[in-house]
Amino acid sequence: MSSPKPCREEGCARPKVDGKHRCYWHHLAAQPIAVQVANAQARLERAEAFGVPKRTRVDPSEWPNGERWCAGCQFFVPIFYTRGSRCRACASVGAHESHLKRTYGISREDYDRLLAWQGGRCYICQQVPRSKRLAVDHDHVTGQVRGLLCANDEFGCNVTLRRLLNDVTMAKRAMAYVTMTPWERLKREDPPGSDWYSVTPASQLTDEIRVPDDI
């Protein structure tokens, strides 16, 4: 019987995961952070199920070649999958938890409950996050947490909503754009450069653009 083919990543001799081109660790590193965290939790639960005593430190002389000990998931992980003294997933959890408490005054449990309530998706575009966790959207005046939105620095809903709320005219024009599009206005021969509020039927207008209370 032939031995499993090695991972296609250069310098990695670990066997490929069935049906994949990479080993478990390289494949895991390319997954959404939520998947990586779930795998770290599964590693920890497996150690606990086997009754392995929890260790905060393992002497480096005991580390397998090319690996290091992660005290978070209680597992030896490849050096390339570490960040500082922990695996990427456990390090990410620690940093995220600290950021939530320091910036928004909420716990990781609060975040996870809100994420589950939103079905694991951005509230506005309904996309599941991949490379970045959903960002905590909050009122920049009161500090009140509103919900979780996708966090792309250029196109994410968190950034888009902030731009709209910081410029009332821009928000109203965005509303007008989908209520009566420029193409529709052109076809009905509205004059070029017309202000949106002067050509949109009054019944379709609102004097106030307000974020729904449940966001």
Image (cartoon, helix red, strand yellow):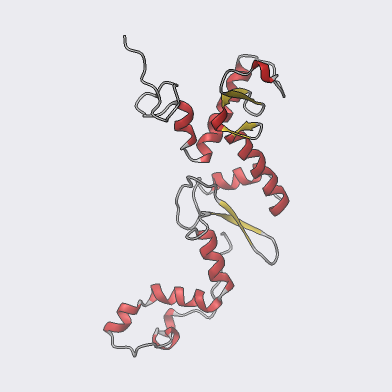
State the residue in front, 91 or 141: 91
The image position of residue 18, as x and y in percent, is: 37, 23
Quadrant holding the N terminus: top left
- Looking at the rendering, which quadrant does residue 79 occupy? top right
Residue ID at (58%, 29%): 41
State the residue in front, 79 or 207: 79
- Looking at the rendering, which quadrant does residue 215 occupy? bottom right
- Looking at the rendering, which quadrant does residue 92 occupy? top right
> Farthest residue in the front direction?
11
Where 108 falls versus 12 (above or below)? below
The image position of residue 185, as x and y in percent, is: 32, 82
Residue ID at (53%, 35%): 36
Where 211 falls versus 92 (above or below)? below
> Farthest residue in the left direction?
187
State the residue in front, 203 or 152: 152
Where 80 falls versus 57 (above or below)? below
The image position of residue 152, as x and y in percent, is: 50, 55
Looking at the image, residue 125 sits to the left or right of residue 39; the answer is left
Residue ID at (48%, 58%): 124
Looking at the image, residue 176 sits to the left or right of residue 82; the answer is left
Where 185 falls versus 86 (above or below)? below
State the residue in front, 6 or 94: 6
Q: How many marks?
A: 0
The image position of residue 164, as x and y in percent, is: 53, 70
Looking at the image, residue 78 sits to the left or right of residue 55; the answer is left
> Farthest residue in the bottom direction?
191
Residue ID at (72%, 50%): 102
